[in-house]
Image (cartoon, rainbow, N blue to C red):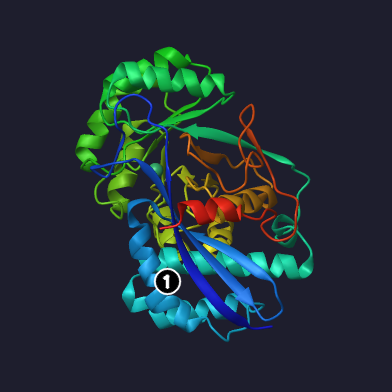
Amino acid sequence: MLITSAQAILLQIPIEQRGPQPALYGRPWKTLDTLLLRIETDGGIIGWGEGFGFHGAQAAHSALESLVIPNLIGRDPSQIVPLMNDLQRRLHLYGRTGPVACALSAVDIALWDINGKMAGMPLFRMLGGSTRTHLPAYASLLRTGDAATASRAVEAALKRGFRSLKLHEVELDPVHAARDTAGYDVPLMLDVDCPWSPGDAIEMCRRMGDLELYWLEEPVWPPENYDGIADVRSNGGIPIAAGENAGSAMDFKHLVTAEAIDFAQPSVGKVGGITELRKVVALASAYNVTVHPHSPYLGPALLATLHVNAAAGEDMLVEHLFVEPEATLYGAAVRPFNGSVAVPQGPGLGLEPDLAVIEKYRR
Ligand SMILES: [Mg+2]
């Protein structure tokens, strides 16, 4: 079997605005920008992949079109590991993280989808099998910047049945408001997106001591300051999560051996797809580090995360981005219900994206 064509597809799906305009990396956040990859084979099997999108979707789309897809045509999709190794080597000087890594992640996910479909098996079975039909999910709330809006978002997520929550705030008022609203029985995580020096982060941990955070995520700038994160972990008194910015299993090795994290957060759409995510899961397990993948995805990358989580045989939480997009790719099939999400049971990724949604929101 050979790959005959591949198309990068950029979707922009408006999200419902709750309260003040949310921001993402300093820009207004009005649409969910999703980067899809459709790979076609001469055997008629079509595989779907997804790379991390958001404001970087256009750049990763360009990387797919100009660098990656020309290297894919005519290749054998059944040789996932050799093919991915070859692409990684050919393109390494264009970036081991960022748009190129996101583009390669999309390829790997699509190759796994094709191989699962060829075998007539859902991916979780190809990855070792699982009896789990549902997985625990947490609501990942957008940054609000104010106490009242944070409180309302927490109420909305609890009402939807979520039993653990993550905030994206850097000020303490909204975090205290969220904790007051949720109570102390609900695990509460805080993702600050790399703002502080290690010293400032330790000081912030002291000020947050009474909040009983389940984890503090990415407290230190720059994200690759693993010794700095380790310093915060040993002196801040709050469990630490990080890893969504790590570009490979090798990068995770440095993060883990620096004793920087309690929770590893590889992102399947950034780290190199399912192949690399599995390496990170194995590595973390050897160091007694728990994996909770980063997965604010709408498409194949979300499905890929579900399959890897199911097959890992451990309680890995699914990150559900708590937004209401105007449309979704899989209807209600992977919409969390009472804090858990169903593992797709069809071959490959287990679900096919809604082509009408793709046509409508394609840019
Ligand atoms: Mg994060």
**x 69%, y 83%: residue:** 1
337, above or below 42, in the image: above
Question: Where residue 204 sits in the image (x, y, percent)?
Answer: 25, 29
Name the image quarter holding residue 349.
bottom right
Name the image quarter holding residue 237.
top left
Q: Quadrant of the C terminus?
A: bottom left
Mark 1 CB lies closer than 8 A to ligand 1: no
333, above or below 94, in the image: above
Q: In the rendered picture of this protein, how many numbered marks are placed on residues?
A: 1
Residue labelled with disc 1: 64
Q: Amino acid at mark 1?
A: Leu
Which sits in the foreground, 60 or 11? Answer: 11
Name the image quarter holding residue 81.
bottom right
Q: Mark 1 Cα within 10 Å, few/some/many (few <14, many 20+)?
A: many
Question: Where residue 83 sits in the image (x, y, percent)?
Answer: 56, 80
Residue 98 visible to the viewer: no
**x 47%, y 67%: residue:** 8
- Secondary structure at numbered mark 1: helix
Judged left or right of residue 215, residue 207 is left
Residue 43 visible to the viewer: yes
Which sits in the foreground, 20 or 112? Answer: 20
Question: Where residue 15 sits in the image (x, y, percent)?
Answer: 42, 38
Judged left or right of residue 13, residue 84 is right
The image quadrant where one finds ligand 1 is top left
181, above or below 146, in the image: above
Residue at the far bottom: name it.
Answer: 74
Which sits in the foreground, 75 or 270? Answer: 75
Question: Where residue 226 sits in the image (x, y, percent)?
Answer: 32, 52
Judged left or right of residue 346, residue 56 is left
350, above or below 334, in the image: below
